[in-house]
Amino acid sequence: MKPLFAKGPSLSVRMLVLTVLSVVLMVVDARFDTLKPMRSQMGLVLTPFYWLADLPVRAWEGISDQFNSRSVLIAENEKLKAESLLLQRRLQKLATLTEQNVRLRELLNSSALVDEKVLVGELIGVDPNPFTHRILIDKGGKDGVFLGQPVLDARGLMGQVVEVMPYTSRVLLLTDTTHSIPVQVNRNGLRAIASGTGNPERLELRHVADTADIKEGDLLVSSGLGQRFPAGYPVATVKEVIHDSGQPFAIVRAVPTAALNRSRYLLLVFSDNRSPEQRANDAAQAQEEADRKAAGQQATPAESSTAPASGTPAAAAPGAGASGTGTPATGAATSVPAAKPGAAPAPGASAAKPTASTPATGVPATGMPATGTPAKPGAPKPAATPSSKPPRDH
């Protein structure tokens, strides 16, 4: 006969088994990539729960917006109009600077982008672990998000994507202890590495020389080194610089420009994904094409200078000037070489027919005296030129 109540393992044994299983799962998750697909699927399953957890906040914001007073809305409208005018003025200046920057980059064959493509995302969750600074956003692999993608808000850089799921992603903030970013001082270009401290309001610059030109109030921007973060975005503002004569490095503390604890809407930046080798090859090809165009432009004026200018006489056509009418042939006639001293004119020279190289009567040729002009003493007499009238019969 079976007992009515079967006795199973004791609670202590169950606790031990579950503890061992939990430790094994944590080790496997930390050391191997076996559980990443499962985590991705779990994130997909938990997406509706995130939406439901955020629903009360959305509902409260909607109700509070509905009950705002008319005077507050009017004042806010006036303030927004004034800010819009100021931003439009700044936008006009930025448009001019952007066009100038584009032209200069084209001249330098630069491959950097002036404007990057961005995607607007919204924060839907925060990691409850106090020692990890991570947030959850509502954009994932279906929206084109990729690992390492830079994330920023309206004030500056916030961090980068470290985990991508189909419809959500996790972002590691700049202030996390495991995060570092290459920066440079906007005032003088001094490069440094800004590392997280675990404090959401503080960053530290590691290994800055005690004699480095950095002071309180300097703006730190991303340098673009490492090809991970785009260059030129604000990162932090130097708050404190401590010099110790006995230490080789100064202690530099900075405050992030981004509102890491307050921003709700974020921007995901899609920058140039080409490798450094591809960028170098593209720049080399652009340089070769520019050199080829410059060589072609230099060759064009040289060819035009060798061509006959307008009004320059060309070679006479065959048979031109043979009629002996006294009209010069088309173009200047070529000069007749002078006879050697002492040489008699060839027999029958007076009856020789004029050729295309013989100048017409009365028209002086280059290097030959005109008809009727006395020649120099000792020079042979020129051959007689046939008259335009036919000879009389005797």
Image (spheres, grey):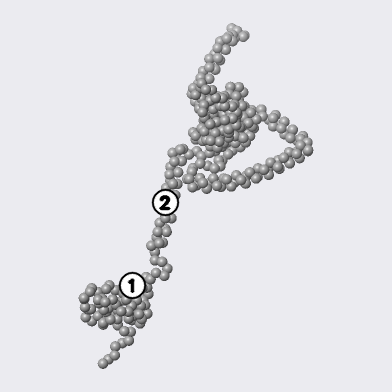
Is residue 362 rendered to the left or right of residue 270?
left
Residue 103 appears in view: yes
Q: Is residue 86 above or below residue 122?
A: below
Q: Residue at x 21, y 78 (%)?
A: 344
Tag 1's secondary structure?
Answer: loop
Residue 50 location, quadrant: top right
Residue 232 vs residue 360, the one in the foreground: 360
Tag 2's secondary structure?
Answer: helix
Q: Is residue 359 above or below residue 160?
A: below
- Which numbered disc covers residue 258? none
Circles 2 and 1, Cβ within 8 Å, touching? The answer is no
Mark 1 belongs to which amino acid? Thr
Q: Which residue is mark 1?
A: 366
Mark 2 belongs to which amino acid? Arg
Classify the position of the C terminus by image quarter.
bottom left
Residue 221: image location, x then y, percent: 56, 34
